[in-house]
Image: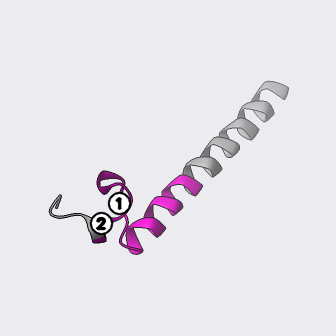
Amino acid sequence: MNGIIGTAIVLAIVIGIVALVIRSMVKSKRQGKSLQCGMDCSKCGGCH
């Protein structure tokens, strides 16, 4: 039983971290930034 609880806690932490990363990426994209353009597509000449 303790192994299941430990696994559930670790899984919840990993899911939380992944959710924060995805949220950060969506927020950056909405602000006109992109990982492919050095985080500033407004200064990129044509990567899209």
Q: Is residue 39 visible?
A: yes
Q: Which of marks 2 and 1 is nearer the N terminus?
A: 1
Quadrant of residue 40 in the image?
bottom left
> For residue 25, what is the image quadrant?
bottom left
Describe the element under mark 1 as helix, strand or loop: loop
Q: Which mark is residue 41?
A: 2
Seen at 28% across and 68% down, the residue is 43
| Residue of label 1 | 34
Q: Nearer the viewer, residue 5 or 17?
A: 17
- Residue in the image at 79% along x and 31% along y: 6
Amino acid type, callout 2: Cys
Rounded to the nearest angstrom, the CA distance separating label 2 from label 1 is 6 Å
Residue shown at the point (55%, 48%) measured from the top left: 18
Residue 45 versus residue 17 in the image, above or below: below
> Which segment did they paint magenta?
20-42
In the rendered image, residue 48, in percent from the top left (x then y), is placed at 16, 61
Q: Is residue 21 above or below residue 7?
A: below
Characterize the local packing of mark 2: few (<14), some (14-19) or many (20 or more) Cα atoms within 10 angstroms.
some
**Secondary structure found at label 2:** helix
Looking at the image, which residue is at 42% across and 74% down? 31
Can residue 26 be found in the magenta stretch? yes
| Secondary structure predominantly adopted by residues drawn in magenta | helix
Q: Is residue 24 left or right of residue 41?
A: right
* Vertical side of 30 occupied by 37: above or below: above
Count of numbered badges drawn on the protein: 2
Q: Is residue 36 magenta?
A: yes
> Is 23 on the left-hand or right-hand side of 3?
left
Q: Which of marks 2 and 1 is in front?
A: 2
Residue 30 rendering spot, x and y as whole percentages: 40, 74
- Residue 1 in sight: no
